[in-house]
Amino acid sequence: MTARDLTKNQEMVLGALSAADGPLSAYTILDRLRDRGFRAPLQVYRALDKLLDYGLVHRLESINAFVACAHPHCHGHGSIAFAICEKCGQVEEFSDATVQSRLGDWSREHGFKPSKTAIEIRGTCATCLA
Amino acid sequence: MTARDLTKNQEMVLGALSAADGPLSAYTILDRLRDRGFRAPLQVYRALDKLLDYGLVHRLESINAFVACAHPHCHGHGSIAFAICEKCGQVEEFSDATVQSRLGDWSREHGFKPSKTAIEIRGTCATCLA
DNA sequence: TTCGTTGCGTAACGCTATAACGTCCGTTAT
DNA sequence: ATAACGGACGTTATAGCGTTACGCAACGAA
């Protein structure tokens, strides 16, 4: 399941995301990989699906974009939160045990079985405020 | 700003959302309002924009859909969380002061000025588990 | 009146994601 | 070996979500 043996396409998509200084849309990834042989969205989406499975990439639901995981080595990092700057596009990835446990409590109390949690704060980062 | 005087279109869109038993996509709203004169997506999106402003409607980022606010009378309810059942589509809206304050703390500590926060738990609801 | 703002209607377009084929290749079981 | 299977891949087409750009009408403020 935690297959760290990436295919060529997965390697390239992860490479594109790691090289970027912020989140990328699937179509932007496609464009950046065109000269490496990519031709269709599905090539990107299929690779992303796997990378998401492996926890190497995160999806930012509120902006339809993807980022390489900032902490790819500590797997199992429950639910992660993101602070997304609407001015510069930079994303900070963090996790908070209290938040996680509170949301876990709510789920337990309501008989809800969570599969994936998205926590995304949109706003303006410190750099852009200065 | 908190204009409770809705226009005809806003009224109809809010009505469609309130009548629905779950979240609706903009295009589904459009279809349901076609016989009331709606013809183009923009009519829906413009109404939704205002309703979101007024806090009468929420957007579910992770499924590109919209719901009528469950507590439209207590405005100013900071950041709201949603539990979205992937089986039946039902959504539970709730808010947790601890979660809000933890995320607020993080923002303060990092000089991040939040504008809008999305918290969405996807999973399976109690009813569907039974 | 004149101007600015707000909402509305229509058409066209762009971005995001998936469906439905078929192919190739490596693994496993017989 | 080879048949059968699963997984990744390539291509085309299509579905779904959202916006741009234009013009018009109504209303309130200067």
Image (cartoon, coloured by chain):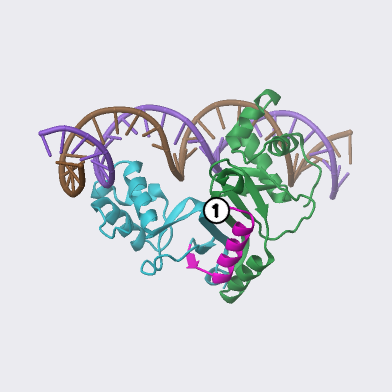
Chain colours: A green, B cyan, C purple, D brown
Horizontal and vertical percent position of residue D5:
74, 46
Please give left or right for residue C27 compared with residue D23 in the image: right
- Can I make out residue A99 in this image? yes
Amino acid type, residue under disc 1 in the picture: Lys
Give the residue drawn at x 64%, y 36%: A44
Q: Is residue A86 above or below residue B67?
A: above
Closer-to-camera residue (A23/B107): B107
User: Is B8 located above or below residue A39 in the figure?
Assistant: below
The verdict on residue B105 being magenta is: yes
> Is A10 or A89 nearer to us in this picture?
A89
- Residue D30 quadrant: top left
Query: What residue appears at the point 58 percent right and 53 percent down from the top-left corner?
Result: B112
Which residue is most to the bottom? A109
Q: Indicate left or right for A118 with A17 as reference.
A: left
Pinpoint residue A55: horizontal percent, then vertical percent: 72, 51
Magenta stretch, residue numbers: B90-113
Q: Nearer the viewer, residue B78 or C23?
A: B78
10 Å crowding of disc 1: few (<14), some (14-19), many (20+)? some
Q: In the image, B23: left or right of B123?
A: left
- The residue where tag 1 is placed is B113
Q: Chain of mark 1?
A: B
Locate the C terminus of chain A by quadrant.
top right
Task: Determine the residue positioned at 24% across, 46% down.
Answer: B37
Q: Residue A54 location in percent, x, y?
A: 73, 49
User: As drawn, is C27 to the left or to the right of B15?
Assistant: right
Residue A81, position in %: x, y? 63, 56
Residue A117 makes an appearance in the image: no
For the residue labelled by badge 1, is the local secondary structure a helix, a strand or a loop? Answer: strand
Q: Is residue A126 above or below residue D22?
A: below
